[in-house]
Image (spheres, rainbow, N blue to C red):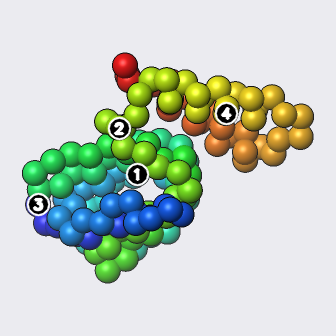
Amino acid sequence: MEQFNLEIISPEKSFLIKNDALEVVVPAIEGYMGILKDHTPIISFLKPGIIDVKLNNESLNFYVDDGVVEFKNNTLSILTSNIFDIKDINKNNVDIIIKDAEEELKKENIKDQDRFILEKKIEVLNSLNIN
């Protein structure tokens, strides 16, 4: 398989920069989308979900809240407000994030878009098998 560039950026830092991505699956708002070298240029929004990165010699999995994904000139750029490596998180931290999201959902004048994002976040985090 041919390789392309990947950059994941959060407000704090450049989270991940790789030049040997073989395939990246992102949780686009339209559904999970697989990106390979020479993919059609796209811009899409992300919903809470798992980014699955396949590199030459390893696979990486990240949880992402939301953001924007752009692919052009064989570079995939992901801009997100919140991302973490699934192998670096523990059950207690996930439980806290879920509890906070559930509290946000209880607010009276929550927008439909925010409700959708929070519900998706809770669903994805509950599906992770973290000890």
Compared across the picture, whether 47 is left or right of 69 comes to: right
Q: Amino acid at mark 3?
A: Met
Badge 4: how crowded within 10 Å, few (<14), some, or many (20+)? some
User: Which residue occupies the foreground of this view, 17 or 52?
Assistant: 17
Residue 88's mark? 2
The residue pinned by badge 3 equals 1
Disc 1 to disc 2, C-alpha distance: 19 Å
Compared across the picture, whether 95 is left or right of 69 comes to: right
Badge 1: how crowded within 10 Å, few (<14), some, or many (20+)? many
Mark 3 in CB contact with mark 1 (< 8 angstroms) = no
Q: Point out the tag, 2 or 4, that comes first from the N-terminus.
A: 2
Q: Position of residue 11 (x, y in %)?
A: 54, 63
The residue pinned by badge 4 equals 101
Badge 2: how crowded within 10 Å, few (<14), some, or many (20+)? few
Q: Point out the tag, 3 or 1, that comes first from the N-terminus.
A: 3
The residue pinned by badge 1 equals 26
User: Which residue occupies the foreground of this view, 96 or 22?
Assistant: 96
Q: Amino acid at mark 1?
A: Val
Q: Position of residue 8 (x, y in %)?
A: 39, 62
Q: Residue at x 83, y 41 (%)?
A: 110
Q: Amino acid at mark 4?
A: Ala
Q: Residue at x 10, y 51 (%)?
A: 57
Disc 3 to disc 1, C-alpha distance: 19 Å
Q: Point out the tag, 3 or 4, that comes first from the N-terminus.
A: 3
Q: Residue at x 50, y 30 (%)?
A: 93
Q: Position of residue 18 (x, y in %)?
A: 24, 65
Compared across the picture, whether 116 is left or right of 89 comes to: right
Kind of element beneath mark 2: helix
Residue 61 seen in the current view: yes
Q: Point out the tag, 1 or 4, that comes first from the N-terminus.
A: 1
